[in-house]
Image: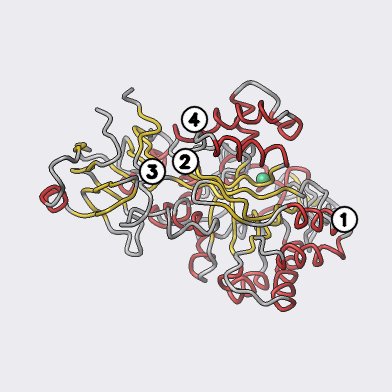
Amino acid sequence: MSKPSTDWILFNGKIFTVDLKDSIAEAILIKDGKIQKVGSSEGIRRHAPDTVQEFDLEGRTVTPGFIDCHNHTVAYGFSLLGQDHRRAREFPVEDVEKALLRAQEGLFKVGVTAQKEAGASDVMIQAYTNLHARGELKLRSFLLYGIHLGRTSVELAQEAVNKYSPGGDDTLTLGGVKCSFDASVSKRDPWLYEEWNKNYTEKDELNFGGLIVPEPQRHGEVVKILHRAGFQVCTHCHGDQAIDKYVDEIEAAIIDTPRTDCRHSVVHCTLPTDYALRKLAKLGDNVVVEASAAYLYFLGDLFAGNFGPSRSRRLIPFRTWFERGIMTGNGADYDACDVNPMYSLYAACTRRPRIGKYGSQPFGKDECLTIQQALRLCTINSAYCMFWEDQIGSIEPGKYADLVVWSGDLYDLPSEELLNQKVEMTVVNGEIVYSTDT
Ligand SMILES: [Zn+2]
């Protein structure tokens, strides 16, 4: 493969546009980093200017760049550098910049072209800003300032809105604040209505979990402060009782200061009740769910063991979210899961855990997505969770040319084969940022 410059045609391909009809096209005309036309090979080539460079896809599949709406990208970069990623918040800005550049490279290699950094420190925000100012940040990044990890409080929320206001451009935006409401499924401490299980069928006697915020009764105030300041509020919630309380808080904040299109996020939203699902549907464009399909694979055995047989079938209910019009995006949540989005596609389509300690299908099949839906989840829907659905997330005229060329046909493979698919080329702003043919 040669390396064309910014104005070029990709033709003779199978292009999954992820437009409203999930149309499949053959060719794309890219001009000045943006998609100018999408259509048949013949039509696009016939009307193209003579100077344009052509690139023969030889039948390969092209998708929009994958978008990860919940990741810890700086931490991922540190682990690629062989450093302790759990200490990502402690490193100086120069080290964070190096980690970010390494993470950017790693994500391009697996076809991820945009991501949400779910909980950035001041130093991380500085590192992103520095790289962007130097033109080195190509991975579109939507940052959430972090007041999470058991620290979510009215005081920190107030400090956040005094220090930052939402804003940015199509490459780097500080758009929201990450809070955490309950903790981790592996420790069985998220807040449930019924006690936790262990080893699938046993009860973890009298353990209902709880919230990890210092003053749970004031969390609603946190949501109001951030909402009033125009931030997207993204709160980590796993347990059914925690999610119910949080969706009520979102509704109260909107009544307090009416705004539309806020897209406040229930992050993870692992075990929503029917009450929460009805409320999420009712809140419409004021809420989104940011889930992690790959939990069902990487943490699937642990989740099944701790939630037990009946709750497991209701975990991370993608199909219900799609059917009820609850906008849902997806993130790898490194280091809980591998950043390769193929794991998310596989898990969203199959709901199969990695080992299958409690059977191959403890989460049932009712909530499985089709591959077309799973691709939407990881592209256009995740773009929506970052307010970028008009810029990226599908292959349509006017959007940035953020694309991935794949080794196989994602729509037409047995699910297991998804895990073997390789990225052959990743394009951002019409520029090749990764290629197997270097
Ligand atoms: Zn996370």
Label 2 CB sits under 8 Å from any ligand 1 atom? no
Residue in front for this viewpoint, 80 or 302 = 80
The residue carrying mark 4 is 105
Label 1, secondary structure: give it: loop
Residue 57, located in which quarter of the rendered image? top left
Task: Identify whether 122 is placed above or below 275.
Answer: above
Percent across and percent down for residue 293 are 55, 49
Task: Identify whether 293 is placed above or below 55.
Answer: below
The residue carrying mark 3 is 429
Residue in front for this viewpoint, 149 or 317 = 149
Q: What distance separates the C-alpha of mark 2 from that of mark 4?
A: 10 Å
The residue carrying mark 1 is 206
Q: What distance separates the C-alpha of mark 3 from that of mark 1?
A: 54 Å
Q: Which of marks 2 and 3 is nearer the N terminus?
A: 2
Q: Nearer the viewer, mark 2 or mark 1?
A: 2
Q: Earlier in the sequence, mark 3 or mark 4?
A: 4
